[in-house]
Amino acid sequence: MHRDLIVIGASAGGIETLQNLLGRLPSDLPAAILVVLHTSGRSSSLLPQILGRSTLLKTSHPQDGTRIRHGLVYIAPPDFHMLVQGNRIRVLQGPRENLHRPAIDPLFRSAALSAGRRVIAVVLTGMLDDGTSGLMVVKAHGGVPIVQDPQSAMFSAMPRNALELVPYARVLPLEAIPAELVRLLREEIPVPQESAEHPGSLEDKETRLLEMEMPQLENDERPGQPSAFACPDCGGVLWELEENGFLRFRCRVGHAFTARHLTVEQQHAIETALWSALRALEESSGLYKRLAERSTGFGHIESAEQYRDRANNTEQNARVLREFLVHVHEGADEAAD
């Protein structure tokens, strides 16, 4: 038996990195490559053309149910998850993970469930930690985890975070990854004694949630335990899932977050609330000044002074809040790193 399924995840800096990697692979590659690159849901579907200019391999966005074939590069379409189901690809608009669709973890998990030891998973440049959980699953199912050397990545956070939880992954500079992939594909691997499928496992349940299967959505027996936090996407209760020290959260309908992503999203919620408060303070200050002018015009000197005092106090509070918002931005930047 040989490995024949390569799954790759990339985020910030991913286009140039993928062009470099795919451009070094031979046209007769005895494997299929499935790629998730974090994109905006509004992005036009030009990734196959962009990446195709740099490689001899054929690149495309797959349709739901596409049969997986060797020598082809399948790229997740914008706003769709891409999953592996047996020897076919599922393309679904399931719940977002880490605020992304497509997301890297669902691809990695589903590939590990379907192909087990035949999988090679690669985490490339990016921010935060999407891909870490999926890489752990690939490793647990006998696949090979590869992580781009953080020092060679345009954005080092995603590879660095993956290595924290999968320290035995093969760490390679970008230019060395293609040769290692070719070597691993040629390597004979023993046939596993057990089936690669693990029905009822946490990974299987999460994949079924992404596929929007009603029995799983309606199942009240949820893995993990309820947390005190609300889902940033839908407002539902988040359930805590911990695997080998890696903390994640998932709501009833399937939205999922790592602890780092949830922290960043809460930071955004705080910032939004603070900007709303700042706007309200500045509007109040403007109103007090207008009332002070009117009171002065009508000869109500005492009322005018009171309104001016309130305007001054409100302006002072607005200045304090504006300075605090600068520190909120700094905290968000640190969390992203």
Image (cartoon, grey):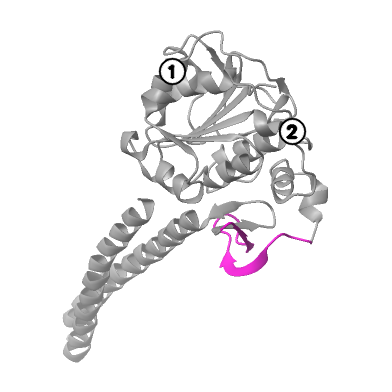
Q: Nearer the viewer, residue 207 or 49?
A: 207
Is 160 included in the stretch rendered in magenta?
no
Residue drawn 42% across the image and 15% down it:
23
Q: Tag 2's secondary structure?
A: loop
Q: Is residue 331 left or right of residue 38?
A: left
Give coordinates of residue 43: x percent, y percent.
Answer: 48, 30
Residue drawn 56% across the image and 41% down it:
135
Q: Magenta residues, as a range?
A: 221-244
Residue drawn 19% across the image and 84% down it:
309
Check the image and report above or below for 167 versus 184: below
Q: Tag 1's secondary structure?
A: helix
Q: Nearer the viewer, residue 270 or 194?
A: 194
Check the image and report above or below for 105 versus 48: below
In the picture of the structure, the residue carrying the numbered disc 2 is: 192
Give the amino acid type for the residue marked by disc 2 in the picture.
Pro
Q: Residues within 10 Å of mark 1 (few under 14, many from 20)?
A: some
| Quarter-of-image position of residue 296 | bottom left
Q: Nearer the viewer, residue 133 or 274?
A: 133
Dot 2 or dot 1: first in sequence order is 1
Check the image and report above or below for 137 versus 24: below
Give coordinates of residue 229: x percent, y percent.
Answer: 57, 67
In the picture of the structure, the residue carrying the numbered disc 1 is: 50
Is 243 included in the stretch rendered in magenta?
yes
Whether label 2 touches label 1, CB < 8 Å: no
Give the amino acid type for the residue marked by disc 1 in the picture.
Ile
**Residue positioned most to the bottom:** 302
